[in-house]
Image (cartoon, rainbow, N blue to C red):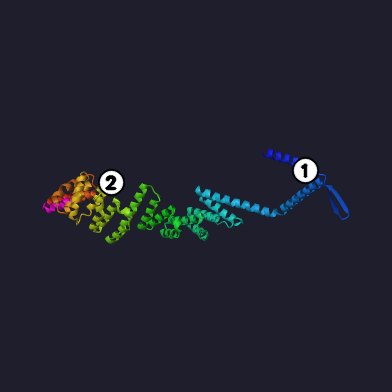
Amino acid sequence: MRGVIWLVVLFVVAVVAATTLGTNDGLVTVYFNRWRIELSLNLFVLSVVGACFVILTVSRTLEAVFSLPRRAHEWRALQRERAAYRALRDALAEFLAARYSRAYKAAERALALQDDTEFLASDVDFRLLASLLVASSLHRLQDPARRDEAARRMQSLVTGAGQRPAAEGARLMAAEWALDDRDASRALELLAQLPPGLSRRTQALRLKLQATRLARQPVEALHTARLLAKHQAFSEVAAKSLLRTLAFQVLDAARDAEQLRRQWSELDGVDRRDAAVVARAAQRAATFGAHEEARQWLRPLWDRLGELTSEDRTLVASALCDNVQGLGPDWLPKVESATVTYPSDPVIGIAAALVMAERGLWGKARRPLEHAANSSVLEPRLRRRAWRELARLSREEGQLEAAARCDQKAAEIP
């Protein structure tokens, strides 16, 4: 197609030249000193055009000759720049392929080539990426001394790089290295220095979760895990399990009833409605003798037993068993209604029996206690509790031999 276009242009030029120059009878006279030169106008035009072409060709030739050193310098610089980028790509590829020694050497070569390349020397992102690969490779090679030295060199670049992606990556990697070194305080310090936008990203929150768990800060870890769950960083099942585990750690960290109350108040509303968390809190309260407070936490769940799963009902009923001491008469209709609704649930049965026994209704408590004591599905702790309550009932009735047999039965349960 291009050849056809040039052919058409050539024909157009030929036609214009024949039309314009073919009947041109003009003369051009040039006077110089005592000389006079007469030329046809056509020859003069062609001579001027030829002279311009020659002058342009000579000027370009001279420019090419005199600019040869500069162009040679630019060519060498371009070759070094390409070699530097090639070394950086090689370093990244070797790092991803777990060849950390080769990655370190390639990244160092990239930095050396950058220092020798004028056009690349001011590229902050290039130096940051290469330095990050150097430090990361040394970290994988378990060389913390040289890694920290590389990180210190990188720190000045990160400080002046602002919000560049490479600088943000360097900050996150430094926190991750601290976690790998099991230095939770250093990791938390680095994470606290992150800009607000970066600190809310999923990876930053994951690192913060690991750091707070390593530093044994369950309350902060729980808040961080809650944010991650909102960002859908975990599956629904994994998020529920993790949040429960962290809530358990918060409650287990309490050393007295007052501290347990503070820990409970710091939990999120969702956690305080979780049957497993409430049951754990009630069991912890029982160890500190705060039975009334434990029953207050259990009451909302007991009022809606029908909405709970079988597993959650078991947890709530088991927690109530640990907190029947000092129980008021308002619980009697609640537990009786639960036994009617769930007649075959052994844990609810023993919870109702213990409530009745606490209120002195031994006649109504005996049969469910005997059923619980001989149950094969109840956990050993509750079966032992049933036998001990039966022993107490026998002593109240003066049946010392029966009480002794009940105590023996309780002792035989592993």
Q: Which residue is drawn at 52% across and 53% down?
A: 133
* Main secondary structure type of the part rendered in magenta: helix
Of 272 and 150, nearer the camera is: 272
Q: Position of residue 53 (x, y in %)?
A: 76, 48
Question: Relative to residue 15, is residue 397 depicted above or below?
Answer: below
Q: Which residue is drawn at 73% across and 39% down?
A: 11
| Circle 1 residue | 20
- Please check the rendered image and state whether residue 392 is part of the magenta-colored stretch, yes or no: yes
Of 24 and 383, nearer the camera is: 24
Looking at the picture, which amino acid does disc 1 mark? Thr
Q: How crowded is mark 1: few (under 14 residues within 10 Å), some or many (20 or more)?
A: few
Q: What element carries label 2?
A: loop
User: Relative to 209, is 68 on the left or the right?
Assistant: right
Q: Residues within 10 Å of mark 2 (few under 14, many from 20)?
A: few
Q: Which label is found at residue 384? A: none
User: Relative to 76, is 154 on the left or the right?
Assistant: left
Of 388 and 197, nearer the camera is: 197
| Circle 2 residue | 309
Q: What element carries label 1?
A: helix
Q: Residue at x 29, y 59 (%)?
A: 261
Camera sees residue 410: no
Foreground disc of the pair 2, 1? 1
Q: Where is residue 34 in the image (x, y as percent from the top left)?
A: 89, 54
Question: Relative to residue 187, is residue 376 depicted above or below?
Answer: above
Camera sees residue 172: yes
**Residue furthest right in the image:** 34
Looking at the picture, which amino acid does disc 2 mark? Thr
Give the image quarter of residue 284.
Answer: bottom left
Looking at the rendering, the stretch of residues picked out in magenta corresponds to: 387-399
